[in-house]
Image (cartoon, coloured by chain):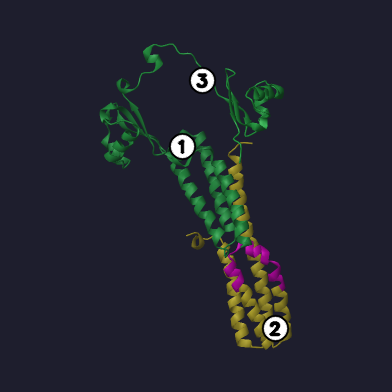
Amino acid sequence: MKSWLTPVFLLAAILAASVLNCHATKQNVIRWQGQLEAAEAEAAAENWSGAEATLSQSYDDWSSRQTYLHITTEHDAVDSADAMYRRCAAYAAEKEPSEFRAELTGLKHQLWLLVEMERFSIKNIL
Amino acid sequence: MATAFLRTVILYFLIMVGLRLMGKRQIGELEPSELVLTMMLSDLATVPMQDFGIPLLSGVIPILTLLSLSMLLSQLSLCSIRFRRLLCGSPTVLIDRGKLRQDAMRKNRFTIDELLEELRGQGISNLNDVKYAILENSGQLSILPWPEVQPPSAKDLGTEVTDSVSLPIILINDGRVIARNLEQYGKSEEWLQKQVKRQGLASCRDVFLLTIDGGDKIYCLPKEKTT
């Protein structure tokens, strides 16, 4: 094998892994945001038990990706989102619609930040 | 604590492998691109070692990327002379046939004081003694004096010399027999044992260093007794 192929292969592998990571993060975040919107709709319909259950399912899904997220993303961003998930659950349990909605909006934005951080964009690169 | 320990171990080995891949050159002989790479690697490694808030990958990926780029550029510079010149630059002649090239010195921001310092460092006190002075890519100055101020060689003196220089081969290193070298030299372990006994030592374990040169001349250094 030509010796220049090794670094080219390694660079290509790193680039491919970065692209795949960006794609995987985006897919995960879109799914979590969908779950959060479903919880929000249930809360708007005053179905708080349904909102709690949907939020709990979303949190379980989120928790199952924690190791991957901690390996690939800044821990502060992941920990912030985790804390927001817990606060949302607390507001849902207390049936506080305005706080719940505000926290949920913040959580959706925080999750989208995870995608933004991994995205190939001029804004991120520069 | 455990995170710091494990991250340090991983990054240490990664950097060691990386520097090993860079080749055998010493820090003082690094090309500009290699010097930049070395500094960047050391800096990159320390960040995830100390800051546990960022993933280890954010240190590992830039390190791997830099090493890959460095290897790729090295390979490309082997293939193309023009690319090598672009990457590493080319040596500059500062003194050409005894004439100081001030334009070249200005271009390389090399002061006359630095030039004189380098000359003194190489045992030359007079600028007139220098025929060529070349500023190498590594930043070192190579000096070639005029023939009349160089010490005469055996060839200059017309003296016949016998070639007595040969590369010594290590047969015992710190009590351990280097079997590959022994085999390469066409000698057996029994022969080696005899040589060790002849030196007044009981076994190979008592030898710190034993070498043999092309003229079958043996050099033996016994191990010091530890108290």
Q: Position of residue A125 (x, y in %)?
A: 50, 59
Q: What is the CA distance from the residue labelled 3 to the residue labelled 1?
A: 36 Å
**Compared to B167, does A126 lie above or below?**
below
Residue B125 visible in the displayed image? yes
Q: Position of residue A78 (x, y in %)?
A: 61, 69
- Residue hosting label 1: B84
**Compared to A16, does A84 lie above or below?**
below
Image quadrant where one finds the N terminus of chain B: bottom right
Q: What is the CA distance from the residue labelled 3 to the residue labelled 2?
A: 91 Å
Residue B73's label in the rendered image is none
**Compared to B173, does B60 lie above or below?**
below
Residue A42's label in the rendered image is 2
Q: Chain A drawn in what color?
A: yellow
Q: Nearer the viewer, mark 3 or mark 1?
A: 3
- Residue hosting label 3: B165
Q: Quadrant of residue A100?
A: bottom right
